[in-house]
Image (spheres, rainbow, N blue to C red):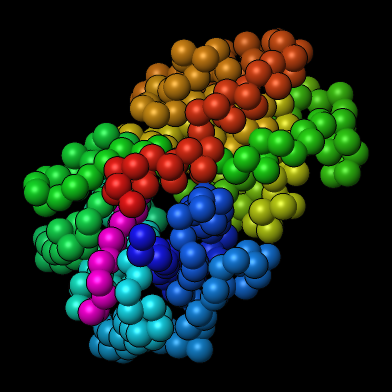
Amino acid sequence: MKRKIFIYVGGLTSCEKGAVGTHTKGILKGFLNTQLFSEKYIIGSNLVCFQTFEELQKIDLSALQPPASGFINKILFYKKYCNAIRVELNKIIEKNKEAEFFIYHRFALNLSHKIILAIRKLKATKTTIVLEYNDITNDQLKFLAQQKSWGTIGSFLRCNFITEKIVHFQEKTAFEKSDLNVAVTDKIKDYILSLSPKSNAVVVPNATDIDLIHSDVDITSSRKKLNIPLDKYVIAHVGTLTSWDGLIELIHGLNASKHKNNILFYIIGNGVMKEKIISLVNSLQLTDNVIFKDAMPFDEAIEYVKACNLVPLLKTIVSYQLSPIKFYEALGMGKPILSTDIEYINEIKNTKYGKVVSFPLSIEEISNAIDHLFENADYFIDKQSEIKNFALNHHTWNQRVETILKVTKI
């Protein structure tokens, strides 16, 4: 049997904070836990956060710094970066001429199509390319423009007929040249096939870390560590503050709750919506209820989730369904969830591990849901082990990787 070598090809920020960084670590852990591969590599920039992954051979391209500005400079840089990846892949192949290569890559605009085309030119015995595609790029750009996240010129440059076609071209090329396209929802898979009908695509929702599920989740000790009052009901949002997170509606719902004086809402993270959210909190005189914390390392941020009673996942963008990692992390810590009625985060309707509210979001419905969850806080604390076991049995990175490997028949 031929030796099999695993290579994760990252982007410009492989150790990126938030969901992308968590996703990369999760996928790598899942593949490292398999016994299929004799060697495992990661190629990309900013690989500091993978130092503890001892089996993983790291090829860091951080010396290639992207230009601060200039359209032509950026185009030239992308070409240079992709060529550097090709050179490093060739080195690995030359050392392992008879091996089979399994290459995993998460889609990055302006990079992925070039990277995958470069991989296709490599002279390896057998190469399997798996492309992960988690968000529909043009939908996100249009939604952000509608929310006035940029000025008029910025919105036009990102959302016009020509830009849309360029994005479609890059995506279509990447989809067609990959052996398998991994989508986290049905609608994302449908989108992939709309651009590339003959592509091989599979739906595999996101997941959470087994180590997180097995970690000690003690509300009392976490609150003492963070100096959070033990007698308060705590809601915790961790992540980039975007316009599709429903935080504006959630704060209005909190303000309308009859229990608001006993509720603390921790918002951990930065983003384009932060100033707007702070302004709303001030105008509603909720400064004693809503506490802001800047973005922090994962291990610190997750402590706030361990200390909380409720994780909110209210969404305002529904065009391609949603499978956010924080949904599975919340389940992994045994936390109830307040979510919008959108596939796949409405899964808790069947499990009774939280509350689902309709889309479009209704302030009154959110307020009523908060009151219901507050009044049943002890019930959900008692359910903690059951919720964690549900995550363990259905939503781990190991299970996710096993599904992908079965589809590729490696």
Give 315 or 275, whichever is nearer the viewer: 315
Is 91 located above or below residue 236 in the figure? below
- Magenta segment includes 123: yes
Give 41 or 110, whichever is nearer the viewer: 41
Q: Is residue 160 left or right of residue 274?
A: left
Q: Is residue 128 left or right of residue 22?
A: left
- Magenta segment includes 342: no
Is 94 located above or below residue 154 in the figure? below
The answer to whether residue 104 shows anywhere in this view is: yes
Residue at 81% x, 31% y is: 219
Q: Which residue sits furthest left?
A: 197
Give 109 or 46, whichever is nearer the viewer: 46
Q: Position of residue 220 (x, y in %)?
A: 87, 31
Residue at 52% x, 80% y is: 60
Displayed quadrant of residue 149: bottom left
The answer to whether residue 155 shows anywhere in this view is: no
Which span of residues is magenta-colored?
122-135
Query: Which quarter of the image is occupied by the N terminus?
Result: bottom left
Figure label count: 0
Q: Position of residue 90 (x, y in %)?
A: 33, 83
Q: Position of residue 186 (x, y in %)?
A: 27, 34
Q: Position of residue 177 (x, y in %)?
A: 18, 63
Residue at 28% x, 61% y is: 128
Residue at 74% x, 18% y is: 381
Q: Is residue 165 left or right of residue 141?
A: left
